[in-house]
Amino acid sequence: MSTDHRTKKALHPFLLSMADDELALGHRNSEWTGHSPILEEDIAFSNIAQDELGHSLVWYTELEKHTGKSPDAMAFERPWEEFTCCHFVAYPKGDFAYTVVRQFLFDVGEEVRLTSLLQSSYAPFVDIAGKLLREEEYHILHLRGLIERLGDATDESHKRMQAAVTMAFPQALGVFEKLSTEDDLIQEGVFPGNEKLQSQWLESITPVLQSASLSLPIQQKNGTITPHCKPDNGGRSRNHTPHLQQLIDDLQVVYRAVPGASW
Amino acid sequence: MVITESDLWEALGTITDPEIPVLSLVEMKVIRSVSVGHDRAHVVISPTFVGCPAMDMMKSEIRNKLVSFGINHITIETTFSPPWSTDMLSEETREKLRLFGIAPPPQRGANLQADLAQPVRCPFCSSEQTVLESPFGATLCRQLFFCQGCRQSFERFKPL
């Protein structure tokens, strides 16, 4: 019973980090609605935004079982200082190259984490991961296609994609920042830990980017890939950039204008 | 009067999908199970896509329908086990989709890319000279095609 209770407490930062990441990136993607370079990508990023917001709803709903706080309260009533998303998902949407690279790096990270949760000792994660992975498959297929085509299509596209990778890679490492309860989660078999997930993520993204003529600040030795740059950490300990404040202000403005309104 | 589970299945079968009004939530396999006791009912649903904005509306329509039977204690549980899949849709349901103008989804194999590469028949002119314009569409459950036979855009239910 006490172990069960400890596991549940250890789950909070994990659930919250996943929910907050999805909410913030979903919001950033929605900023492309009506503004994408071509209609098909407008539709694609609006869909991806909606999927990520849906995923945040699933994690907030799971969290509600432990805390009693509703998903709406978590998304719309919480001050921005209390979010635990990584810096990566809160940065402005940038140009389309940055958007594509960020989404690819994030989605592969999500795929790696969800795949690990299929083996989780926490039963609800097994069902949730099975469901969300089916949606993620579409994102990764689409984003990988864009990376492959834009990476070395023209000098201009290569230049922009390379700049995006150079900028986004250290930021993306922040997804795998160690959680306060990480050791308990690993010990209880909830997930294998961010260090392991980051290695799997590196193995997955590196060949795709390299085959698109895009280089990464990494070291490859004896089949092991390690980052050769400083990770952009801080989000998990609520040490945020001003971009998150802007994002949350924007996200909550309607809800805060008329509290409790329904339509 | 005793209300049976088959009464409720029949009633819930009249609630249509807000985005595909020719199909009911029962045909869509969104409603998984129904159980009824004295003055209470329990319904298990599985969402198509978790970000589907119609889920709240579906829940409130299920609730209203059960209230109309005089049932006061209603619980609606969401399950992801097994996850909802277009493979659950019957042949009859697929035909209804096609007549509505949405190409039905193919069976899901192990490889999504291979599934998407299969020829697709235009729901309007039956030509197989069609091109996938986008794996995404106007709603989460649809994707965009163009038919070179009748030179029209059409949608297909996204295989999930």
Image: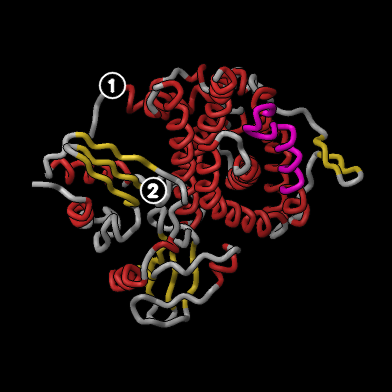
The residue wearing badge 2 is B47
Q: Is residue A20 above or below residue A96?
A: above
Q: Please state the horizontal and vertical placement of residue B98, each as a whole percent of the image.
A: 33, 72
Q: In this view, does B88 lie above or below B84?
A: below
Q: What stretch is highlighted in magenta?
A: A186-204
Please name the amino acid that badge 2 sits on.
Answer: Pro
Is residue A260 found left or right of A65 in the rendered image? left
Q: Is residue A57 above or below residue B27?
A: above
Please name the amino acid that badge 1 sits on.
Answer: Pro
Q: Which colour scheme is used?
A: secondary structure
Label 2 crowd (10 A; few <14 / some 14-19 / many >=20): many
Asked if residue A195 is among those painted magenta in the image, a careful observer would answer: yes
Label 1 crowd (10 A; few <14 / some 14-19 / many >=20): few
Regarding residue A86, the answer to whether it shows in the image is: yes
- Circles 1 and 2: CB distance less than 8 Å? no
Asked if residue B19 is among those painted magenta in the image, a careful observer would answer: no
Spatial CA distance of label 1 from label 2 is 28 Å
The residue wearing badge 1 is A259
